[in-house]
Amino acid sequence: MPDIFHTSVSGLLAFQRALATTSHNIANAGTEGYTRQRVELGAREPQGFGSGFVGQGVDVTTVRRLLDQFADGQLRSSGSELGRLGVYSGIATRIDTLFGDPDSGVGAALQRFFAAVQDVATDPASVAARQAMLGAAQSLAERFRSAAQQLDQIDMGLRSGLAARVGEVNQLAADVARLNGAIVTAGSTMNGQPPNDLLDERDRLVRRLAELVNVTTVPGDDGALNVFIGSGQALVLGPVATTLAVGSSDLDPSRQEILLRTAGLDQVITPAITGGEIGGLLQARGELLDLGRQQLGLAATGLALAVNDQQARGLDLQGEFGRALFSLVAPRVLAAVSNSGSAGPVATVLDAGTLTGGDYLLRFDGSAWTVSDAATGVAVPLTGSGSAADPLRFAGLAVVTGAGATAGDRFMVQGTAAAAASLAVTLADPRGIAAAAPIRTLALSGNLGNGTISAGEVVDPADPDLLAAVEIRFLTGTTYSINGAGSFAWTPGADINVNGWRVRLDGSPRAGDGFRIERNTGANGDNRNALLLAGLQTERLLSGGTTSVGDSLNVLAGRIGTLAAQAEVAAAAQETIHASARDALLSESGVNLDEEAAELLKWQRAYQAAAQAITVADTLFQALLLAIRR
């Protein structure tokens, strides 16, 4: 009879634990990250008799989490991708709004500026029109600066976001390491039985960690979970967590890098961070912020240099050569903090038409300089020695390296990244707008042929003899002299280049016919240079002579708009994928209250049955005792 007691009591205890586990599931139905649990029962070893084996009851072998490891891994992976796309899409939308506004964007201000230039060309003697042009130039420069400042504000938010998320990663890693220690201790003191609630909490933390940064996990034999980030850098090893930090780039103090601190050393792992919210921030910085700054600066540089150059080729209302309308900073050269030499290279724009807007890494190996694209690492063709007489030339830039460089020194050359933020109007007097051409041409009286001469154009405003009077006299129908000197062959339609200007002669001049090129004096109504200034709106100044300034801004707005639209679509699609992965995990691991209610009823009935078996055993035992007493 005592065997019935033991068997019934084992069932009573087992069903009590099953009821407690089911109650635990119901109580945590709304707990984030909770995985439902099930009691695993196993029959005790039976006792043998001559007629066979009789069971001795039941034991609780374990309390198991109903967790699908594959579904859990899919949820972590989709969460990491969703975190990346969500952050990237948000930043892309903000930058798209900045460049895509047709009314208040830089492109609209550029159109208004050239419309004002055209008004000056229409009435070059009007000081009011000139003043309006200066006002439009001021507005344009302000729009460039405002766009650059808004990019800076987005960058500041990005840097704050990086710092906050790195801090959260460190806290999560420390918590995972702490839980690893607790889980290992619990497993060793409970004969390897899993501490399910601790495991749930650790899994929840790892899922959040994956939303912040791309991670991989490797379980240890002792129950710990090792966590690796990036390209395999250890973040958590057992009960020990590694710390991440945000530090300044060696080449650009304003640019943040993600550092992994191990054994007192900082390892830059920024390129390895490709997922999660941190990966999205880094991707947005590289693909959107850097692109916006560089291309906006490229447009500002191309515009300023072209307008200033054309100003220098004309005369203002006072009969003087035009002064620069715009100013902007020179390309920046940043020395690496780790440099041991004293060289301070200086960069200038050599040819705006071949500028790319990109950043370049300049290296010195002890005997020679090399240049590579800072974003891709691809080598860039380089000429020159670096001296003032023979500067390094690459990608539209010229760099005078100076003395003092040592082997291993590195410099970051930013051709246009800072240009838009510095664009300003330096011309204050509207009479200083150079609307007139500096030279004029005329056919001498008494010409017998029907030769004609063009209005002339300036090709080198720095030529000291540009404004000197020149007389071209035909010696024959096919030869001419200049100021009475020489005999030069001529064919109809050929250009003649002298003293920094160019004219074209057509028709059929006769011997003795003459033409004069002279300073354009008293030409307040001359609009030839103003027309050339207005023509810069459509002139292909950039990208090797294939793109105008306006087109480059439109291309930039279109490219960022496309990236923003793609990111928005991808984020929406990833949200669906993530929801599907979450549902797949919850279908196995989530608490279903209807199912738990059924389980509760089942174990309640089983518990009552076991209790009834004890009652039966007690009745039988009492009957036996009564029989013995008789």
Image (cartoon, helix red, strand yellow):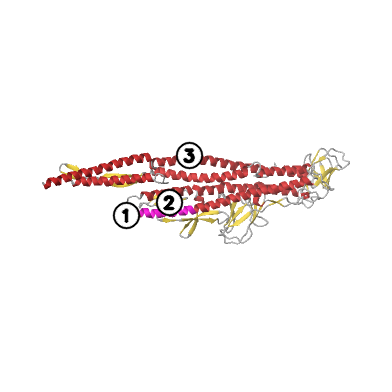
- Is 124 situated left or right of 537 in this image? right
Amino acid type, callout 2: Val
The image shows residue 256, relative to residue 57, as above or below, that is: below
Q: Is residue 82 left or right of residue 543?
A: left
Using residue 302 as the reference point, say whether residue 566 is left or right of it. left
Residue at 44%, 45% (x, y): give it: 76
Q: Name the disc covering residue 227, or none.
A: 2
Q: Position of residue 66 (x, y in %)?
A: 36, 44
SS state under label 1: helix
Tell me the residue that label 3 is attached to.
576
Residue stretch rendered in magenta on the structure? 167-184
Q: Which residue is mark 1?
A: 189
For the residues marked 2 and 3, what is the alpha-carbon distance in whole angstroms?
A: 27 Å
Q: Give the quarter of the figure containing the N terminus.
A: top left
Query: How many angstroms separate mark 2 from mark 1 (CA)?
Result: 24 Å
How would you classify the magenta stretch by its main secondary structure? helix
Query: How far is disc 1 from disc 3 in space, using C-alphas?
Result: 43 Å
- Which badge, 2 or 3, comes first in the chain's sequence? 2
